[in-house]
């Protein structure tokens, strides 16, 4: 008989993670239900290994800002998108699941309009996922298993990874944003937010877009 864990019995401190081994799919589903929807923690699950991460407030501020920059760029370029935030993506056939810091459907935005309940055996993975301060190899592997085509990892610097032949390859540019120097631009305006606050950073970012993207 499968013993179901009560995740409420386990405490994960802010900025730390809890790793559980030998978790079958039924236990994984039970833990997700136990955690509930209104929480700050994020999960990553692959082949029986479950990691629960409790992000720091600074982490949350950064991921929201990066997401805001992405939305501003997409809107300025008049590119349609659907934002799915930290939605739980899971596939029982691949024994994999995770919750990104943020994610977007861009190429597949039309397909995902109006979707209320995901079925990853039918629905595509997000076109772009964003992670802040990723130290977990488990989560990186889950993204590859789920087939997310573009992944941004921010940890003081921004790295762009493109899925190619089943493996992530670091890239200078984002296929979504073409020649825009994303790896330089995003950290630049994040630094402004650290020094002057979000409003000043977003205002400066909009000015930068107006000056640099008007003819692109």
Image (tube, rainbow, N blue to C red):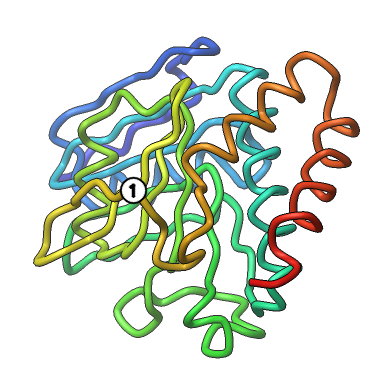
Vertical relation: 62 (above or below) 84: above
Query: Of residues 54 and 193, which is closer to you in this image?
Result: 193
Q: How many marks?
A: 1
Q: Residue at x 56, y 49 (%)?
A: 102
Q: Which residue is mark 1?
A: 172
Q: Residue furthest bottom?
A: 110
Vertical relation: 206 (above or below) 77: above
Q: Residue at x 41, y 58 (%)?
A: 174
Q: Position of residue 189 (x, y in %)?
A: 69, 32
Query: Of residues 150 and 142, which is closer to you in this image?
Result: 150
Q: Horizontally, is 208 left or right of 1 in the view? A: right
Secondary structure beneath label 1: loop
Quadrant the C terminus occupies = bottom right
Q: Position of residue 176 (x, y in %)?
A: 47, 68
Vertical relation: 135 (above or below) 100: above
Q: Position of residue 113 (x, y in %)?
A: 63, 85
Vertical relation: 3 (above or below) 17: below
Quadrant the N terminus occupies = top left
Classify residue 91 by image quadrant: bottom left
Q: Residue at x 34, y 32 (%)?
A: 5
Q: Residue at x 76, y 47 (%)?
A: 208
Q: Position of residue 103 (x, y in %)?
A: 53, 56
Query: Of residues 163 and 200, which is closer to you in this image?
Result: 200
Classify residue 3 by image quadrant: top left
């Amino acid at each position: 008989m499968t013993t179901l864990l009560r995740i409420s019995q386990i405490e994960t401190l802010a900025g730390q993670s809890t790793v559980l081994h030998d978790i079958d799919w039924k236990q994984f589903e039970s833990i997700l239900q136990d955690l509930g929807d209104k929480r700050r923690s994020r999960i990553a699950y692959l082949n029986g290994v479950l990691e629960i991460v409790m992000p720091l407030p600074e982490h949350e501020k950064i991921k929201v800002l990066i997401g805001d920059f992405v939305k501003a760029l997409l809107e300025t370029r008049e590119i349609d998108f659907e934002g799915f935030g930290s939605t739980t993506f899971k596939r029982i056939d691949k024994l994999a699941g995770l919750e990104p810091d943020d994610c977007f459907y861009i190429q597949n935005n039309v397909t995902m309009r109006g979707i209320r309940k995901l079925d990853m055996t039918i629905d595509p993975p997000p076109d772009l996922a964003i992670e802040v301060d990723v130290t977990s190899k488990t989560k990186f592997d889950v993204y590859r298993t789920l087939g997310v085509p573009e992944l941004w990892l921010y940890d003081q610097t921004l790295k762009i990874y493109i899925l190619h032949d089943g493996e992530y390859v670091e890239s200078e540019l984002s296929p979504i944003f073409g020649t825009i120097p994303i790896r330089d631009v995003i950290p630049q305006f994040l630094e402004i937010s650290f020094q002057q606050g979000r409003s000043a950073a977003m205002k400066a970012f909009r000015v930068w877009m107006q000056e640099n993207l008007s003819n692109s």
